Image (cartoon, rainbow, N blue to C red):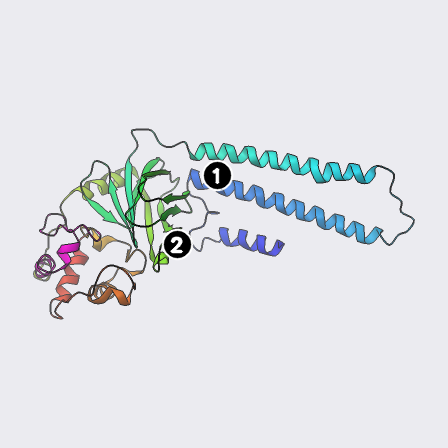
Amino acid sequence: MVALGIGLALAGCAGGGPSALDPAGTGAARVANLWWLLFWISMAVFAEVMVLLTWALVFRRKQRVRVRHGQPLRFVIVAGAGIPLVILVVIYAVGLRDLAALGDGPGPEAPTIEVTGHKWWWEVRVQGVDGATANELHIPVGEKVRVRLRTADVLHSFWVPQLMPKTDLIAGEVRETWLHAERAGSYRGQCAEYCGTQHAHMAFLVVAEPRHDFDAWLARLGEPAKQPQTDAQRRGQQTFVQSSCAGCHAVRGTGANGRIGPDLSDVGSRWSIGAGAVPNDGGHLGGWIANSQTVKPGNYMPPQQVAAGQLPDLIAYLQSLK
């Protein structure tokens, strides 16, 4: 048991992936501190039990050792009731303090990001901005950002281990949480509630950046998508708008206004394809367009009938949308 606990602690600090024990924000820091408090209390109790067990095994064989009248009862009261009561009261008080702090959201002037969970991707919008993106949201470093959560279908759960505890998305309800990053960086989030066959491939990225970079991201989010610069990109745009792609996806500033799938106005700059399913590069993008079911089985995008000669131009256009 001790080895397991120490192994979990070391794994959480190793930095090999998103871990609640490697906090980068005030919300996650409270969770991590409470975890460490419980961990060290558990280790102390375990050590005490082992010492008492050793003492009992050693002195049990010494027949001359006598226990004075009343000692066992006092020991049981102190060690079996008094000390555990103090520990539980302390943990309860710390837990209430942290719960109140986690419920203390940002003020009305804070940016509000609206996130909708779909099977299996995240739609991201910012209050007051017309545009949308998918599976990636930006926040300013050192500021609290309000996050309003909805689900378009089944139960999902929004969780960024290094920034905040998870918040469940329940059909028909608008849930609210907040994010606060103390240092710049990219923090992976994940749906933390099983929502179907591709639950594991429902990841997203939170990018914490200086305020001026965040403002620039907001400005780009509300602008039309980047216009094609080469002949290949122009042909690709034409293919996109005239094909079935435009029926499900939107690209701001074009005739593509679909709302079923993710908005692709900035797809070329996204960290992944398919909410963490595969890297965002030309080869994987082409495979996704041709038949996304081979990459992420069960998603709602059917195979696309794009001619082999048109596919490279379509890939070039989509990669240019940054």
Q: Earlier in the sequence, mark 1 or mark 2?
A: 1
Circle 1 residue: 30
- The N terminus - image quarter: bottom right
Residue at 38% over, 32% down: 105
Residue sitting farthest toward the right:
64
Circle 2 residue: 194
Residue kind at label 2, given as amino acid type: Tyr
Left or right: 283 in relation to 255: right
Real-space CA distance between mark 1 and mark 2, rounded to the nearest whole angstrom: 25 Å
Residue at 33% over, 36% down: 145
Element type at mark 2: loop
Frontmost residue, 283 versus 62: 62
Q: Is residue 258 magenta?
A: yes
Residue kind at label 1, given as amino acid type: Arg
Left or right: 182 in relation to 253: right
Q: Horizontal and vertical percent for residue 45?
A: 66, 45
Q: Horizontal and vertical percent for residue 3?
A: 61, 56
Residue at 28% over, 47% down: 152
Q: Residues within 10 Å of mark 1 (few under 14, many from 20)?
A: many
Q: Which residues are magenta?
A: 234-262
Position of 141 relative to 302 (above/below): above
Q: Horizontal and vertical percent for residue 122?
A: 29, 49
Q: Horizontal and vertical percent for residue 117?
A: 30, 48
Left or right: 13 in relation to 120: right
Q: Is residue 87 magenta?
A: no
Q: Splitting the image into 4 quarters, where does residue 300 fall?
A: bottom left
Position of 119 relative to 97 (above/below): below
